[in-house]
């Protein structure tokens, strides 16, 4: 009697749904220790020659990145150009030179300089901390050039493959071809990591935080399920092909969905877009959305040293409002500066713990003019375009904060709301709704603050998961408060983009879901397939689960009934 060997199934956090099956290719992260040892024995004899070798390696690496950039367009080209720029960074060179002059060997000087900059970026936190992945990537590329090895990174497969990596740097993923890389699996990285973002853009299944991913040999047949988070090694080929075909058919059905958002039995759920600027607003305006649920205003000012005038702000905001002047509406979020989004003219410097510091609405406590001028700019844009405009504040912790903010917004004749990103705001949702017109749950921060887990931490993917029972309970409390008050309660964090979770959120009483435009059709199609009482059962099942994986499985079971 033949015995079938048990399948090896690795598990991680699913971040982009879909099923893929292909041979594994593995991104190499390290330069071989033998080559490093050889170089260390016979490397440049003095500091001047070492610096010259560094300059040559920098030029070759940056030129290669720039050449890749010139063959691409859009975001991929921008990412590669930015990495080429960071490779040539004068500050990094000065730090290397200083170390060489102090007698350090070249590779040690490079590693030390990169550590020094990585430390600074990490302390700045958030988006700047994300650049540490870039810096480490540059260090690996330069080290490989110096020791005479090919640059490490993502192999370009010649047939459709599943890419496994420790984590992926922006330069690794820029220009990835979705026809050749059919799924991404990483050992590290969380739901908001660069890997997850790029997979979402490419529309390929992705699972992050998969322990043991790098032990999978290149060439192993792998099936990736971006809905369950399972990575199955050497599955039955026929069964795998069947599951891939099923997932593909489901995906194709999604693209037929044209809105508006409704459950199968007709309960309206507003599906909205998250936008960053006029360009993304124009794109969203052409999509099947009823408006914008989150305009992140701070993203327009990341590179600004000085606060833009009211007139300039009005112009920027009007570009976002304009595409929605046709009876739709836009929720503008006031500056969420600080922590992961430092803004030179607003953020306080030198905070010990910026995520728990003076960020978001808190910046206006010591600088009320900052908020007042922004509200004036928003009001002018609203008047100029005629678009229905709602305004909400980020990082609200107390009811008096919400009341003061609402009063300031209403003076301009606009609808006022607050974000629920801090557990205190969720627990006080009833009272919050007595003083504001609407609530919008920012599940990215709500998860971070509920679980005490940095949303950017690459090793905490299991905690920075909005399916965590405690996060779901807080969402349910907030949604119930909205139902009782008869006021809208939306979700605008990443959780809104998860079709499975969307059913449970709607079942809890959430009235709108705001997400990246690419996620709108999958979420809309999923909701259209499920009646409201099933959504309610999904909510109950998710709330009754003990952990995120159990919650996903419980909701899947409800939907499959
Ligand atoms: C959130 O925290 O979920 C949110 C939508 O805000 P941001 O991601 O911009 O912090
Ligand atoms: Mg937030």
Image (cartoon, rainbow, N blue to C red):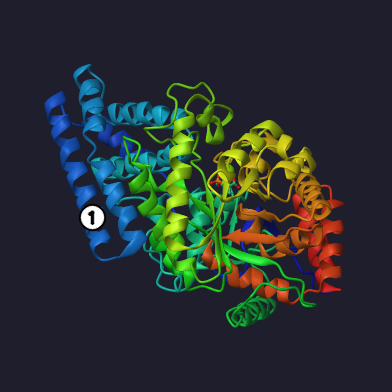
Position of 60 relative to 71 (above/below): above
Tell me if residue 398 can be seen.
no
Q: Mark 1 points at which residue?
A: 66
Dot 1: within a 10 Å radius of its alpha carbon, few (fewer than 14), some, or many (20 or more) residues? many
**Residue 435, picture quadrant:** top right
Position of 536 relative to 167 (above/below): below
Q: Check the image and name the residue furthest to the top.
A: 102
Position of 162 relative to 124 (above/below): below
Mark 1, secondary structure of its residue = helix
**Residue 430, picture quadrant:** top right
Residue at image location 55% in from the left, 35% down from the top: 361
Give the total of numbered labels: 1
Q: Quadrant of the C terminus?
A: bottom right
Across and down, in percent, residue 543 comes to 84, 52
Q: In which quarter of the image is the N terminus?
A: bottom right
**Residue 396, picture quadrant:** top right
Residue at image location 21% in from the left, 42% down from the top: 58
Question: Is 556 left, or right, of 305 in this rendering?
Answer: right
Instruction: Give whichever of 151, 561 is nearer the camera.
Output: 561
Question: Is 103 left, or right, of 198 in this rendering?
Answer: left
Across and down, in percent, residue 210 comes to 62, 51
Question: Is 534 left, or right, of 422 in this rendering?
Answer: right
Tell me if residue 489 can be seen.
yes
Across and down, in percent, residue 407 comes to 61, 39
Mark 1 residue's CB less than 8 Å from ligand 1? no
Residue at image location 79% in from the left, 66% down from the top: 556
Residue at image location 25% in from the left, 66% down from the top: 71
Across and down, in percent, residue 362 comes to 55, 30
Position of 114 relative to 504 (above/below): above
């Amino acid at each position: 009697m033949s015995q079938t060997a048990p399948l090896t199934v690795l598990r991680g956090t699913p971040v982009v749904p879909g099923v893929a099956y292909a041979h594994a290719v593995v991104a190499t992260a390290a330069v071989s220790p033998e080559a490093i040892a050889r170089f260390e024995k016979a490397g440049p004899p003095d500091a001047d020659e070492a610096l010259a070798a560094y300059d040559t390696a920098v030029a070759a690496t940056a030129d290669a990145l720039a050449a890749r950039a010139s063959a691409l367009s859009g975001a991929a080209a921008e990412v590669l150009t930015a990495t080429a720029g960071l490779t040539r960074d004068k500050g990094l060179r000065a730090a290397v030179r200083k170390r060489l002059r102090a007698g350090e060997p070249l590779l040690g000087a490079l590693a030390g300089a990169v550590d020094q900059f990585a430390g600074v970026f990490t302390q700045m936190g958030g988006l700047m901390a994300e650049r540490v992945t870039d810096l480490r990537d540059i260090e690996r590329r330069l080290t490989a050039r110096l020791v005479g090895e090919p640059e490490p990174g993502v192999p370009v497969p010649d047939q459709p493959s599943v890419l496994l990596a420790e984590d992926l740097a922006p330069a690794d993923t820029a220009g990835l071809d979705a026809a050749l890389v059919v799924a991404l699996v990483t050992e590290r990285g969380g739901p908001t990591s660069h890997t997850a973002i790029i997979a979402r853009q490419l529309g390929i299944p992705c699972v992050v935080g998969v322990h043991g991913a790098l032990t999978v040999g290149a060439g192993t047949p792998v099936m990736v399920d971006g809905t369950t988070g399972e990575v199955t090694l050497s599955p039955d080929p026929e069964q795998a092909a069947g599951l891939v075909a099923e997932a593909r058919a489901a995906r194709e059905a999604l693209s037929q969905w044209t809105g508006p958002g409704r459950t199968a039995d007709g309960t309206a759920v507003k599906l909205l877009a998250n936008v960053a600027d006029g360009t993304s607003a124009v794109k969203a305006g052409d999509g099947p959305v009823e408006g914008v649920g989150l305009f992140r205003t701070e993203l327009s000012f990341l590179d600004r040293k000085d606060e833009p005038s009211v007139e300039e702000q009005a112009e920027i905001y009007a570009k976002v409002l304009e595409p929605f002047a046709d009876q739709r509406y836009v929720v503008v979020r006031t500056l969420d500066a600080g922590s992961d989004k430092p803004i030179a003219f607003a953020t306080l410097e030198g905070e010990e713990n910026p995520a728990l510091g003076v960020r978001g609405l808190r910046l206006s406590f010591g600088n009320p003019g900052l908020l007042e001028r922004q509200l004036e700019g928003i009001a002018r844009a609203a008047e100029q375009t005629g678009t229905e405009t709602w305004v909400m504040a980020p990082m609200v912790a107390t009811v008096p904060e919400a009341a003061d903010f609402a009063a300031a917004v209403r003076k301009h004749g606009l609808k006022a709301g607050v974000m629920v990103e801090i557990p205190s705001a969720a627990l006080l949702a009833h009272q919050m709704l007595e003083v504001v017109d609407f609530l919008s749950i920012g599940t990215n921060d709500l998860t971070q603050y509920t679980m005490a887990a940095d949303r950017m931490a690459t090793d905490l993917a299991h905690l920075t998961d909005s399916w965590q029972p405690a996060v779901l309970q807080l969402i349910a409390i907030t949604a119930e408060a909205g139902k009782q008050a008869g006021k809208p309660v939306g979700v605008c964090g990443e959780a809104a983009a998860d079709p499975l979770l969307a059913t449970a959120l709607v079942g809890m009483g959430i009235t709108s879901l705001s997400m990246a435009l690419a996620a709108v059709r999958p979420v809309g199609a999923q909701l259209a397939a499920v009646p409201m009482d099933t959504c309610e059962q999904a909510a109950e099942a998710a709330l009754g689960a003990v952990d995120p994986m159990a919650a996903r499985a419980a909701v899947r079971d409800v939907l499959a009934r």
